[in-house]
Structures are given as C-alpha cells and as structure tokens.
Image (cartoon, rainbow, N blue to C red):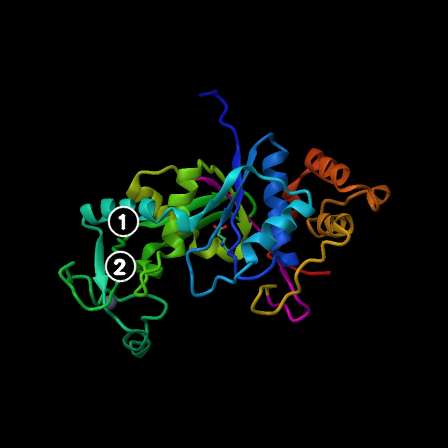
Amino acid sequence: MPDTQQIVGRFAPSPTGPLHIGSLYTALASYLDARSRQGQWLLRIDDLDTTRNVKGAKEQILKTLEAFGLTWDQSVFYQSQHLDDYYAFLYQLKHQQLLYPCTCSRKTLADSALASENYPGFCRDKTFTETAAHAIRIKTDQRTIAFQDSLQGLITQPLTSHGDFILKRKDQIVAYQFAVVIDDYLQGVNHVVRGVDLLEVTPRQIYLHQVLGLNTPEYMHVPVLVDSQGHKLSKQTLAQAVDAKSPERTIFTLLGLLKQNPPGELENAPINELLDWAQRSWSPGVLKGIVQLPAA
Ligand code: GLU
Ligand code: ZN
C-alpha cells in the first residue's frame, strides 16, 4: 500500500430514467473532486429497486456520461450483480443478533403517531421463525453519530431520531441504506460526493459501518439544483433529460452553477479542455453553506 491513500470517488445513479441536469451536476462535482486529486472515479448503477428501474435507462446514463467526457475507471458496478454480497453481510449482522423480522404494515405504522418518522420497535422481540411476510430491521441503540462533512460541517444525529431501520424490504428488495454501505466497501470508495438531500440518511450508513467494522468514507454533500419553485430536480418533477447535443455548453453552465467561475474564453472550448481547466482549479469550498441552487 502506498502511504498516501489514493482517492476513490464514485457516482451512483439509479436507472429510473435518463440523466437530468441535477444528476449531471452531482456527477461533475464528484468527478472533479476525485480527478483534481489524481483519484479514481467509479460508476455504480443503483438498480436494486426493480419496481422503479426503467428499461434502457442504464445504457442511456452510460452514454450521456461518455458524451459529457465524464469517463470512469474500472468496469461499471451493478448492484443487481451483488445480491450474494448483501446477503453475506446480512448474515453477519444476524449472527451479531442485530436483526429482526418486522411484519408491521404501512397502516400499523401510520396509525401510530410517531411511527412513520421513528420506528417504535413493535417487532423487536420477533425471531426469524416468523413465517408471515416481513421486512428486516436492524436494532439501533442510544448512540449519537457524528461526522465532519467537508462542506456542511459537523453533523450529529442520535440514532433515536429514527430508530431501527429497514435493511431488506418486505418485497425482498435490499434497502438502499444497506446496499450503499456494502458497495462503497466492495469498491474501496473513500470519498463520497453526493447531493445534500442524502445528508440526513448518512448517519444511518455510518452506524452500519460501525457495527460491521468498515471504514467510513469522507463525505462531501453538495447543493442540489432546484426548479423555479424551489423543488429538487428529479425524474419525479419531470426534469428534462440533458441534451447531449452541445455538451461543452452544458458543462460550462454547470461549472458556473458549481461556482467555479469558468473564464469566458473557455465558453466554446472543447470538453477536454474545459474539464482539464476545471480539475486544475477545482475549489469546492465556495459551495459551503449553500444547500440549494436554482437550476439556471
Ligand atoms: N442512487 C442514489 C440516488 O440516486 C445515490 C446514492 C449515493 O450517492 O449514495 O440518489
Ligand atoms: Zn414491525
């Protein structure tokens, strides 16, 4: 091992539709953060939620990233090809007596005033002899998770603010919260750059690192782009797919939105030149304190 650890970053889109400008914004930030420090940049496709996957979206995402010059290292990591890994870690946690089957229905939880935000532990004493359809939850304790986010500062959250959470859903789908922890470990990711909308769930992921004995990566949660109503751009708000016809213009605009102040003479520069410039002068600190940015 070299004594200075190489940076390994990643971008992890869900194939629920084509990439929109908001996801490209995050992709570019994470790309620049890794590349500016001679790091690797990996691509993972978060395709576990088969109820939301859209046919053809994976291919379209890869093509879009390529068109924008955001090339990744190694082969693409598909979550759907790693189910055995998730099960192996679930087994470990089960062995640690940290898991239990939860048969609560949405309705039971909705009827209990607190439960949609904070699971009250109704099923904590259930054992895996349970035959009814169930989710799998992990027991949490009284600890407070604290971490330093490189843009958002010190974040602290007591686990009691959400309680025991789901690692495998009732429909058998492995939960994002759990998969992401295993994926980052398997891919050797040590620098996570992603949208600030995921800041709130990060302590849950760190709790999983702690109980599994895995290293916690460094985190940088960047602002998300919002529409004119202040809503996060997402496929749900029908954000338009990025137009790959003039990728250089889009990258130039995104660099402006990332507050990198690209010089005017680069406005019509080829994409390699733009990205080279952006890597050399990458300074994410200017995004400190900003949580949302209007898309244009
Ligand atoms: N696939 C997740 C999303 O689209 C991102 C996961 C992550 O970056 O940890 O929001
Ligand atoms: Zn339950």
Q: Residue at x 57, y 52 (%)?
A: 59
Q: Which mark is residue 136?
A: 2
Q: Residue furthest top?
A: 2
Q: Nearer the viewer, residue 261 or 184?
A: 184
Which residue corresponds to the image point at 14% horizontal and 59% vertical from the top-left? 127
Task: Judge from the rendering whether residue 171 lies leftward or rightward of residue 43; answer left or right.
Answer: left
Which quarter of the rendering shows the C terminus?
A: bottom right
Q: Which mark is residue 90?
A: 1
Q: Specify few, some or many for label 1: CA neighbours under 10 Å numbering under 14, 14-19, or 20 or more.
A: many
Magenta segment range? 217-231
CA neighbours of label 2 inside 10 A, class few (<14), some (14 to 19), many (20+): many
Q: Position of residue 121 (x, y in %)?
A: 23, 64
| Vertical side of 209 occupied by 139: above or below | below
Whether residue 288 is visible, yes or no, is no
Residue depicted at 31% across the width and 38% down the height: 213
Label 1, secondary structure: give it.
Answer: helix
At label 1, the amino acid type is Leu
Type of amino acid under label 2: Ile
* Quarter-of-image position of residue 130: bottom left
User: x and y percent of residue 110 in the render?
Assistant: 33, 76
In the picture, which quadrant includes the N terminus? top left
Marker count (numbered): 2
Q: Residue at image x 31%, y 70%? A: 115
- Residue 277, picture quadrant: top right
Are discs 2 and 1 less than 8 Å apart at CB? yes
Cα–Cα span, label 2 and label 1: 9 Å
